[in-house]
Image (cartoon, rainbow, N blue to C red):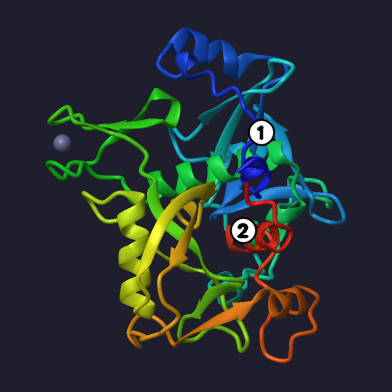
Amino acid sequence: MKHAEQVVFGGSGLDRAAHIRADTAALDQARAHEQARSVVLWRGKPLVQGEGRDTLAMVRMDHPVLEAGQPGGQLFLGLSEAGAPLFACDISSWAPDDLNKAALGQFLDPSEQHHPLLPETHVFAELRRLMSRLNPRDAELAATAKALMGWHASHGFCAVCGVRSKVSHAGWQRTCPDCGSHHFPRTDPVVIMLITHGSSVLMGRSPGWPEGMYSLLAGFLEPGETLEAAVRREVMEEAGVPVGAVSYLASQPWPFPASLMIGCAGEALSRDLTIDPVEIEDAIWVTRDEMMSAFAGEHPVLKPARKGAIAHFLLKNWLADTLD
Ligand SMILES: [Zn+2]
């Protein structure tokens, strides 16, 4: 797919400079670099600035806000185009005075937090809300930092022997001081599929979704499975539809918390639907004309897919006939 990498979080060609990660001297030099900057995360929310919350805010390495960072928590993300070292720091231990805990738990957390040591224009905001407004570089840095920090937060102990592991390789590994095992940041692959039959596409909805919200079917890959097999299995399980030819379209890092969405196209061999109510609440065939009107916000039932998600991107390209 020609436009594959134009998806949100599709990447910006960040130089991750992996050779620096295990080189202590080079890493110290990078930290001390005059132009070095750090992305700041608070409970999974990146620090952003600008009225439209459309720019990632980075701070100098000696900024006092970073003192709330986790020990060993300065993760190295890479180098900017100008050669400036870029890091990420998590200051989740900081607690704002007026913390609204209920808002934090929402799917699209609308709350913003301001740290008193930072300018008024800088706030922590939910990445899902602003992801489609960030430029590709900021989006890649935010997604990488969030996924990596999330992994450290939930993988503090050695999965082999249970001892607390230590951050190594500038955040790109955890090493067990007891049994010596190395653990690497995990990414969970998910297939998401544009299943078509003639000029219709298969859409499903999960229980509890807002009314009128349908999306492409998706599911986690299982061990020992190819992309093609996962697509066919998920569509059969959820909608009872046999799928023939499957092809890869585009992928999207999805740091909520650590997925890689793998967009595929599949040709349905039948239109008959048998829904598994445990997996999905409904599945429907939607024609191109109906999807056009949903995207225009004019469909009586169907809401447009959420902007920024790969489902929206694939459907938009399907409508524009630019899947090739
Ligand atoms: Zn161990």
Task: Find residue 84 and report its image quarter.
Answer: top right
- Drawn side of residue 249 relative to residue 167, left or right: right
Q: Is residue 323 above or below residue 21?
A: below
Give SS at disc 1. Answer: loop
**Amino acid type, callout 2:** Leu
Task: Find residue 158 and report its image quarter.
Answer: top left
Q: Mark 1 or 2, which is nearer the eye? A: 2
Give SS at disc 2. Answer: helix
Residue at label 1? Answer: 12
**Amino acid type, callout 1:** Ser
Q: Is residue 293 above or below residue 252?
A: below
Q: How many marks?
A: 2
State the residue at coordinates (64%, 56%).
Answer: 127
- Frontmost residue, 308 versus 315: 315
Instruction: Return the mark for residue 312.
Output: none
Q: Ligand 1 is in which quadrant of the figure?
A: top left
Q: Is residue 88 above or below residue 28?
A: below
The N terminus - image quarter = top right
N-terminal of the pair, mark 1 or mark 2, is 1
The residues tagged by marks 1 and 2 sit, at their Cα atoms, a distance apart of 19 Å
Q: Position of residue 11 (x, y in %)?
A: 62, 37
Q: Position of residue 176 (x, y in %)?
A: 21, 32
State the residue at coordinates (54%, 54%).
Answer: 44
Query: How would you rate the neighbour count of disc 1 (Cα within 10 Å): few for under 14, some for 14-19, many for 20 or more?
Result: some
Does ligand 1 reach within 8 Å of label 2's beta carbon?
no
State the residue at coordinates (39%, 46%).
Answer: 187
Instruction: Return the mark for residue 314.
Output: 2
